[in-house]
Image (tube, rainbow, N blue to C red):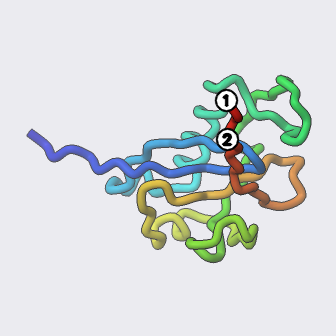
Amino acid sequence: MPPKAEITIVKFKRARSTYVISLILNQKKNLTVDHFISSLVHAINSSGGLRLVELIDTEDKVQVAPEDIELAYPRTKDAPYSNEWIPILDDLAIELTVLNDYDIIGFKFTDDADFMIEQPVYEEEAV
């Protein structure tokens, strides 16, 4: 029986949106920009599409294609909400990075000027 593949859970974030995706990173074929983007595109489209305007409560979403998405690592892993990003330009950038469960990778859509994520704020409801 072959060993079970090790799964790493990665959070892909854009503005207020977060997509949590399980990736098998101990296989070289999965350590590519194309694999990361296609996994993200599948998650986005399976959820109904990407909300282009995050600040407006709207249900208008678009289906995305791999060429619509760019990825980036936070410059400082411990401070992703500082919004300082290092674009992931090639497969080597993926191969040389150790990802742990719940690490954040930023993404932007074609129309976005820059990578930008917002820290979630949870408000307790008065009962």
**Residue found 78% across the figure and 60% down from its top:** 115
Indicate the secondary structure of the residue bearing disc 1: loop
On the rendered image, what quadrant is the N terminus found in?
A: top left
Quarter of the picture holding the C terminus: top right
Residue 24: x and y in percent read 37, 48
Q: Is residue 22 visible?
A: yes
Q: Secondary structure at mark 2?
A: loop
Q: Amino acid at mark 2?
A: Glu
Q: Indicate left or right for 98 with 89 as reference.
A: left
How far apart marks 1 and 2 lie (CA) works out to: 9 Å
User: Residue at the spot x=62%, y=66% of the render?
Assistant: 73
Q: Which residue does the numbered mark 1 point to in the structure image?
A: 127
Determine whether, in the image, residue 60 is placed left or right of residue 72.
right
Residue 82, position as x, y percentages in the image: 73, 71
* Disc number placed over residue 45 in the picture, else none: none
Residue, x 48% and y 54% (percent of image)? Answer: 102
Task: Farthest residue to the bottom: give it.
Answer: 76
Give above or below for 11 relative to 124: below
Q: Position of residue 41 (x, y in %)?
A: 64, 37
Q: Is residue 89 visible?
A: no
Relative side of 8 to 40, left or right: left
Q: Is residue 74 above or below residue 6?
A: below
Measured from the top left, where is residue 15 in percent x and y?
A: 77, 50
Q: Hey, which quadrant is residue 106 in on the image?
A: bottom right
Of the two numbered discs 1 and 2 in the rendering, the one whose residue sits closer to the viewer: 1
Question: Which residue is label 2 attached to?
Answer: 124
Q: Residues within 10 Å of mark 2 (few under 14, many from 20)?
A: few
- 126 sits to left or right of 24: right
- Other-residue count near label 1 (Cα within 10 Å), few / some / many at <14 / 14–19 / ≥20: few
Residue at the location (46% across, 72% down)?
96
Does residue 40 lie above or below 99 as drawn?
above
Residue type, numbered disc 1: Val
